[in-house]
Image: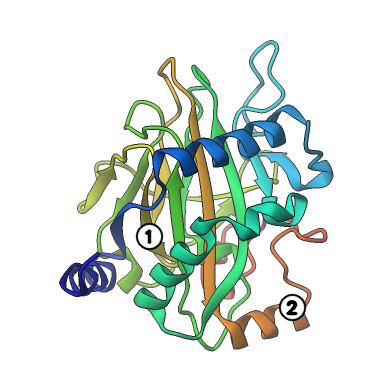
Amino acid sequence: MTAQAGILRTEAFLRDGFAPVGTILSPEELETHREIYDKLLSGEIESGDKRSDLASHVPLREGVRENITQIMWPSALHAPLRELPLQARALAVARELIGDDAVLDFDMMIHKSPGSSVPTPWHQDAAYWIDLPDTRAVTVWVALDEATPDNGCMWYIRGSHQEPLRAHRPTSDGRNIECDCSENEPGATAVPLSAGEAVAHTGQTLHYSRGNTSDRNRRAYILNYRPAEMIRLEREQGMDHGLEDNERKVRNKNAEDADS
């Protein structure tokens, strides 16, 4: 990647709240990540209480375990992930976008199986997080399969990171959160990706993805970064994004729904 390309990406990230990263995994590296991913999905690599259903408020289809499978901290469950080139590349992207003090806060997998058709609700990641004095954060969302609107590519509201956090509320089962938003809002943008490509977004950027109505998998590996000092403050307050037992609820006071 050229220096000019990096400058343009940073400009887009600061202006829009998200920016395509381009190819971050070679075909061979992609296969390595898929193999590990599938072992976690199948249970060959045990995930225990790190595994949950992001759409547990929707009735399950017959014969499936989750509507949207989320596994937190795959790099803690399978240490070899930490040594693969993606870790260094994603960290370099994070430092380019938010500063040289960025380090990994947490990682996760989100899988939408063929025909699952359940959307991930609109939300802002910062609503899940405790309020911190330095709000810089970046999520690097890596497509391990081609990601399109019909199988669950990311959608963003351009510029929403520059506005106050919206009020969030628990989903009907109380296990996740959502806010009011739609694809019809000004600035709504789908970001299709080829397998091995990535997109980065801020913690304040509104985003969601449609359900997977296709006959293809949509495997995503997601890495989140923030300043090292802010991670220290998080951990002091018991926030480790599910490494122990953090519930998925509204924690940021600026995102509390007065009517909930």
Q: Can I make out residue 73 in this image? A: no
The answer, for residue 103, to whether it is visible in the render is: yes
Residue at horizontal 51%, vertical 35%? 31
Residue 24 locus on image (x, y percent): 38, 53
Quarter of the picture holding the C terminus: bottom right
Front-lying residue, 200 or 84:
84
Give amino acid for label 2: Arg
Q: CA distance from mark 1 to mark 2?
A: 24 Å
Q: Is residue 248 above or below residue 51?
A: below
Give neighbour class at mark 1: few <14, some 14-19, many 20+ (Cα, 10 Å). Answer: many
- Mark 1 = which residue? 200
Q: Tell me the residue at 16%/73% (across/down).
A: 4
Q: Residue at x 69, y 62 (%)?
A: 241
Residue 107 circle label:
none
- Residue drawn where x is 53% and y is 47% of the image: 221
Instruction: Choose top left, top right, bottom left or bottom right for residue 190.
Output: top left
Identify the element where label 2 is drawn.
helix
Side of 255 relative to 151 (left or right): right
Location of residue 93 in the rendering, given as x and y in whole percent from the top left corner: 39, 68
In the rendered image, the quadrant that contains the N terminus is bottom left
Under mark 1, the amino acid is Ala
How far across and down, in percent of the image, does residue 239 sit?
Answer: 73, 71
Neighbour class for label 2 at 10 Å: few (<14), some, many (≥20)? few
Q: Earlier in the sequence, mark 1 or mark 2?
A: 1
**Which residue carries the number 2 mark?**
235
Q: Quadrant of residue 2?
A: bottom left
